[in-house]
Image (cartoon, rainbow, N blue to C red):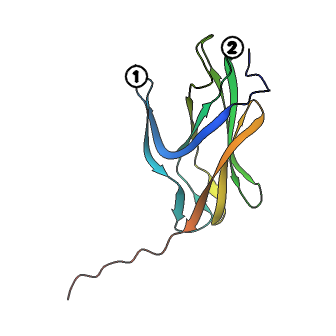
Amino acid sequence: MDQPESDPVVIQAILLSDHVVREAGTGKLTLVGMFGAWNCPGFPFQTPSFFATAVLSNFQPGTNMINVVLRVEQKQTGLVLVNSAARAQIPEGKITPKDIIEIPFKLPGIVIPQQGEYRVVVLANDEKIGERHFIVNLAPPVQQLLPPT
């Protein structure tokens, strides 16, 4: 059974990081290089690949699968920069509303057209369940220190 529509999945967090490592055996995640903004030297700016990890809860008993879509958008225009989907299989009878599932999405490098506000939007079973914003700044020029004379 998919997640019942009357009790939507809840987004607990959306975390941005450079890398995600899943520990063998325990399944624990380690997020490496977490960030909340980009400081870019110029625009358009090509980012390296990165991760957006969706942390979900409020699964109803009997849920055995959930479809999750994550997209990065320019806030002002709604322009979608990247879109990614995942299907989480849940062992039958193994989930409660208080359980939490972390779904890391590896996103390819994206082209950020200009500085401003962007957002990561998460949908579960085609319903928007949350978003987080992040800022893209123009980095100040790097000042070189001159050796003493």
- Please give the label number shown on residue 24: 1
Q: Locate residue 145: give its quadrant.
A: bottom left
Horizontal side of 128 relative to 90 (left or right) equals: right
The circle on residue 62 is 2
Residue 107, horizontal then vertical, whole percent: 59, 42
Compared to 13, does 77 lie above or below? below
The count of marks equals: 2
In the picture provided, is 51 more to the left or to the right than 111? Answer: left
Helix, strand or loop under label 1: loop
Amino acid, disc 1? Ala
User: Which sits in the foreground, 129 or 52?
Assistant: 129
Amino acid type of the residue that numbered disc 2 sits on in the rendered structure: Gly
Residue 53 in view in this figure: yes
Residue 52 is situated, as x and y percent measured from the top left of the image, at 57, 42
Residue at the image position 69 percent from the left and 24 percent from the top: 66
Please tell me which residue lies in front, 145 or 3.
3
Looking at the rendered image, the disc whose residue lies closer to the viewer, 1 or 2, is 2
Left or right of residue 107, residue 5 in this image: right
Q: CA distance from mark 1 to mark 2?
A: 27 Å
- Residue closest to the far front: 98
- Tell me: residue 43, above or below residue 119: below
Question: What residue is rendered at 61% in x and 20% in y?
Answer: 96
Mark 1 neighbour density, 10 Å: few (under 14) some (14–19) many (20 or more): few
Locate residue 83, reporting x and y percent: 69, 42
| Relative to 26, residue 126 above or below | below
Q: Residue furthest top?
A: 92
- State the SS at label 2: loop
Q: How far across and how far down the image is residue 135, in percent?
A: 59, 61
Residue sitting at x 40%, y 19%: 25
Question: Nearer the N terminus, badge 1 or badge 2?
Answer: 1
